[in-house]
Amino acid sequence: MQNLRVNAERLWRSLMEMAGIGATAKGGVCRLTLTDLDRASRDLFIKWCREAGLAVSVDGIGNIFARRQGTDPGRPPVAFGSHLDTQPTGGKFDGALGVLAGLEVMRTLNDHGVETERPLELVSWTNEEGSRFAPPMLGSGVFCGVFKIEEAFARRDVDGKSFGEELRRIGYEGQAPARLRPIDAYFELHIEQGPVLEDEGIAIGAVTVANGQRWYDASVTGLEAHAGPTPMRRRRDALLGASRMVEAVNRIGLDHEPAACATVGFMRVMPNSRNVIPGRVDFTVDLRHPDDSRLLAMDAALRRALKEIAGPAGLALDLKELFYVPPAPFDAECVALVRAGARELGLSQRDIGSAAGHDAVYMNKVVPTAMIFVPCEGGISHNEAENISSEAAANGADVLLRAVVARAERRAGGRGPRAARH
Ligand code: HGY
Ligand code: MN
Ligand code: MN
């Protein structure tokens, strides 16, 4: 194991080929969940898994599992993976790195004839991003029992298409039960999506906690009216009210700095006509914090602020909390395997928190889980300019390889790993 390294060129080729599915003119990727492009990426991933001799199964919510048998097939598998769906102006590596580095781990073990006692399972989760169908992490959420599959199937996109219809349309409503089964541990490699590792010149982040999140849908209703004859003081302008609310959301984030985040990322103005005073505005709110009590304080501040803006302006406010996930400290034993992998490779490392949500956040509720971060250029992500070096991709995959094999080889009772058999 000591000298085992992934094939960095092969990993990079796979990343670039996958990035070609949904490639945008600006060098990013738009591969929204359950679209034809998502289907194409799934088909390619499954083709590669089968070429690597993995047994592929798809569950009822479209999660894809690719299994490498262990010498003791009855033991719960060590799982690892991420997601292939992207944001509308996403990058090549958010999600895809974790899935394809996992595939590279399987290919590398095959190349060197390494067997592991516990089986290994590579996972590609459905709808991690939550951009087309909110809330996010629906595939892992159903698997981990956070959502009922019926709830997921009923979710609709902005065009009114349902999750269930679209999953069936792309042919990925699988036969395997979409529910938890015995899994020994879960690891997820992901780009940091923030600036810390790059700023500090550090190669590997051992993720110790994922921030809590609260997502909301807000609707502000005023009165559509003619932009000309309607006197300024007689207006009930929904967009003016919503604009003040956006400012209030930003203020809440600043009031809880440095660990807080508060974002309005989506807004729909109706009727969105230049000479009509907007009668209704729908928008989203995304609050995050590593401390649950601070996140709750941000929630209270949000409800208060929006009400105080809507009332005097004669606007009706409807605020629904769509999604809440508490902060998630990861499993100490699994995090220690990430640190040990980086140490064995002589890579610089630090503990770090995740301000982004990941499928690992839900897996962490039900099995021992840890994440590995690698730096991304400028800390930029959810942006077509998202970029990493081939070296960072290989570093992350090499740490993933070590953590997964060490976990799969650990003897009962948590004692250290046996030497993996070649
Ligand atoms: O929103 C998130 O943190 C993740 O990218 N879905
Ligand atoms: Mn992601
Ligand atoms: Mn993302």
Image (tube, rainbow, N blue to C red):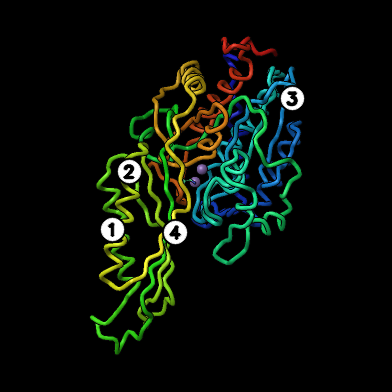
Locate residue 379: give its quadrant.
Answer: top left
Q: Is residue 19 visible?
A: no
Three-letter amino acid code at disc 2? Answer: Ala
Tag 1: residue type?
A: Ala
Q: As drawn, is 272 to the left or to the right of 72?
A: left
Amino acid type at circle 3 is: Gln
x 40%, y 33%: residue: 353
* Quadrant of the image containing the N terminus: top right
In the picture shown, does residue 223 fall above or below 330?
below
Sequence-wise, the earlier of marks 3 and 4 is 3
Residue marked by disc 2: 260
**What residue is at 63 percent from the left and 15 percent from the top?**
409
Give the mark nearer the N terminus: 1 vs 3: 3
Residue 379 can be seen in this image: yes
Q: Nearer the viewer, mark 2 or mark 1?
A: 1
Work out whether mark 2 precedes mark 1 in sequence or the reverse, and give the earlier one. 2
Crowding at mark 1 (Cα within 10 Å: few <14, some 14-19, many 20+): some
The amino acid beneath tag 4 is Asp
Q: In the orientation shown, which residue stands out farthest toward the bottom?
A: 229
The residue carrying mark 1 is: 305
Q: Nearer the viewer, residue 126 or 349?
A: 126
Q: Secondary structure at mark 3?
A: loop
Neighbour class for label 2 at 10 Å: few (<14), some, many (≥20)? many
- Of label 3 and label 2, which has the lower sequence position? 3
Disc 2 versus disc 1: distance between alpha carbons?
17 Å
* Residue topped by disc 4: 217
- Residue 224 image position (x, y, % from top left): 38, 80
Please name the residue that numbered disc 3 is placed on.
69
How much space separates mark 1 and mark 3, taking CA atoms?
Answer: 55 Å
